[in-house]
Amino acid sequence: MSKAVDNVSFDLAPGESLGLVGESGSGKTTTARCLLRAIAPTAGEVWFRLPDGRTVDLAQLTDRELKPVRQHAQMVFQDPFSSLNPRMSVRDIVGEPLVIHGLATGADLDDRVSEVLARVGLQPEHRARYPHAFSGGQRQRSGIARALIMRPSLIVCDEATSALDGSVQAQVLDLLKELQREFRLTYLFVAHNLDGGEIFAIGWR
Ligand SMILES: Nc1ncnc2c1ncn2[C@@H]1O[C@H](COP(=O)(O)OP(=O)(O)OP(=O)(O)O)[C@@H](O)[C@H]1O
Ligand SMILES: [Mg+2]
């Protein structure tokens, strides 16, 4: 059987950023997806510390056990809208995780979406927009808002800024750094090369 990825081992302390760099096809996305149990690893352990101090092996949890844990670990994709319905408004895209987890509805949901949009540098009016009406930078800010709205402790950024050009990339990286300080976020930062300077910008060990 061919393997998408093998023999990966690392640890990541709270509030830290770790860069995961490798060429295309080396298994970075597979590693990230295993980490968040978007796919189940065929072998291995993924130990995750919850805000209440409990440590769980995500690789072993049942789907039911996973659901409440998932809110603490979120992902930001290269293009957060490429896999989503282009007919969904930004409100629905950003608010969807809260709806899925049954954490907010109605006016409360609207308020939470507006609050998080403001935090990533978007306006409340942007709620009614559709992704295609956004620039690349604004789309990425919405993707960050969608992750942030769950108040996660870990955010995995899978090439989250690679497609953006220079100054926009720098602004989004600055935002990620600010959010890290404010919410004591832990980042796993996936990139396929070091040329863009993204990994250096975010700070790594
Ligand atoms: N669902 C899957 N089933 C089988 N093989 C897969 C699957 N997803 C990815 N692969 C293969 O596993 C390997 C690693 O893929 P992965 O997408 O994790 O790499 P990557 O490092 O993220 O690459 P890129 O830089 O292009 O995003 C590749 O050879 C890929 O073709
Ligand atoms: Mg990838």
Image (cartoon, rainbow, N blue to C red):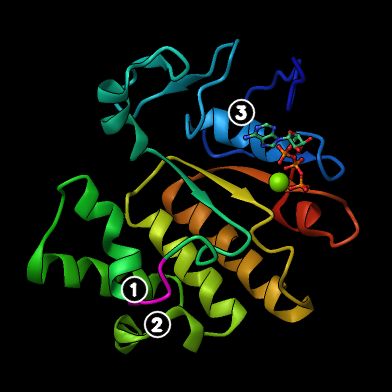
> What's the CA distance linking mark 3 and mark 1?
34 Å
Which numbered marker is on residue 12? 3
Residue 88, numbered label: 1
Identify the element where label 1 is drawn.
loop
- Mark 2: secondary structure: loop
Magenta residues, dominant SS class: loop
Q: Secondary structure at mark 3?
A: loop
> Which quadrant of the rendered structure holds the N terminus?
top right
Residue at 9% in and 71% down: 107
Is there a contact, CB below 8 Å, between mark 2 and mark 1? Answer: yes
Q: Earlier in the sequence, mark 3 or mark 1?
A: 3
Give me the residue at 49% from left, 45% from top.
185
* Segment tinted magenta in the rendering: 85-89
| Residue 159 placement (x, y as % from top left) | 69, 55
The Cα–Cα distance between marks 2 and 1, rounded to whole angstroms, is: 6 Å
Give how far across and how far down residue 32 sits, in percent: 61, 36
Q: Are marks 3 and 2 in contact (CB under 8 Å)?
A: no
Q: Which mark is residue 130?
A: 2
